[in-house]
Image (cartoon, rainbow, N blue to C red):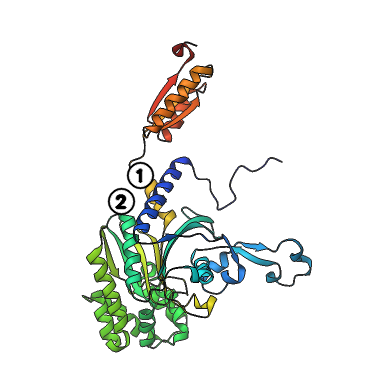
Amino acid sequence: MALSKKPVTGMRDILPEEMQIRDYVIGVIKDTYGKYGFTSIETPCVENIANLTNRQGGDNEKLIFKILKRGEKLKIAEAAAEEEVVDGGLRYDLTVPLVRYYSNNAAQLPSPFKALQMGNVWRADRPQRGRYRQFTQCDIDIFGEASNLAEIELILATTTTLGRLGFKEFEILINDRQLLKAMAMGSGFAEEYCDSIFITLDKMDKIGMDGVRAELLENGFAGEVVDRYLELYKGLEKAENGLDYVAEKLGENSVSSVTEGLQEIIDSVNAAKTADFRIVFDPTLVRGMSYYTGTIFEIAIPGLGVRCGGGGRYDKMVGKFTGRDVPACGFSIGFERIILLLTESGFKVPGAPKKTAYLVEKGVTGKALHDVIAKAQSAREEGNQVLVARMNKNKKFQKEQLEAEGYEEFVEFYREVLHI
């Protein structure tokens, strides 16, 4: 039986044209984040299965590619449950591995520690356009900074990067999990139901206020409590300053530190930003991961109707590894979504070297071939990109393929011309 030439379902091959854009974007990301003091690190793609299934990753924990034990440890016939034959899994994001990394190496790291991590992650998701089972994530995180200076730095570094990549008129949506909880509990919901309520609230942009109300009622919540809760959001739509409105409605003493902190982040980012974007308080922003403890944010591009990144504060996660909580905050840029948007817009890598193809007839050998190679080397030293290849019989098709890869000039070498 012939071997399959297609990638495994949900995986994909990346062709040279896209790879050139990916390499360029990675270069911009590393250069920009480096200027903000972030240091590149790397973690293994395989993590202990217990770490990946600790109820921190939300629905992603249902999508783990699990790894069987090896050798004598694998006893499938004797196993009564999955955990007896599985001990590892491919990472579904970069945050869990990063927190484990920090917990293991904190004594050798500075404080605060600003980490940049890029790498593949895997989720057994349903493949569709723009969504794959293997994809690249790009995260920056700060450990050991309890103040909102962490959020300000993360937002400025990320938005500066997007600006350098040519994105304009995008938005940073910002909220706080503490504020979400205060609004729900202040309306009469019990704390244990907050996560369920937030799952419904997160659908506001898709099903609207009436849809959220209907779903909350279907879930068994009292009508007067639901209406009191949604009245807050109706008032927010009309409020001149949403943060002041929330503080007034909930009682300034209960949430003033949160609303003031969010306002300071917004004001500081606006005062220092260099990219073309708005930072907007969005009281319906939830973020799905249960490990978030405070500020949360997302990148939205209204003109394209897409979101391409997000993050927030997760101050309790290190403590699950070490028994001691450490302030932590991170921002993940939607690398694959950004590549897709750039590719579809016809993006060309700026400042790319001139690409020239030297096509050499098959009969060109010996000293004549040495001269062609020497000429190519000289052009490369001048900063040009030169491909030396034998000329195909179908030269026209060969050129068309090279043009698709960005080659602008063709130099042909024939035996007759070289006097062989």
Element type where label 1 sits in the image: loop
Examine the rendering and report whether any part of residue 287 can be seen: yes
Q: Of the residues under marks 1 and 2, which one precedes in the sequence?
A: 2
Label count reads: 2
Place of residue 327 in the rendered image (x, y in percent of width and height, measured from the top left):
42, 76
Which one is in front, 117 or 87?
117
Marker disc for residue 347 = 1
Task: Say which amino acid is labelled 2.
Answer: Gly
Disc 2 marks which residue? 166
Looking at this rendering, what residue extends furthest in the right direction?
Answer: 77
Element type where label 2 sits in the image: loop
Q: Is residue 401 above or below residue 258?
A: above
Task: Say which amino acid is labelled 1.
Answer: Phe
Give the Cα distance between marks 1 and 2.
9 Å
Q: Residue at x 47, y 71 (%)?
A: 289
Q: CB atoms at circles 1 and 2 under 8 Å apart?
A: yes
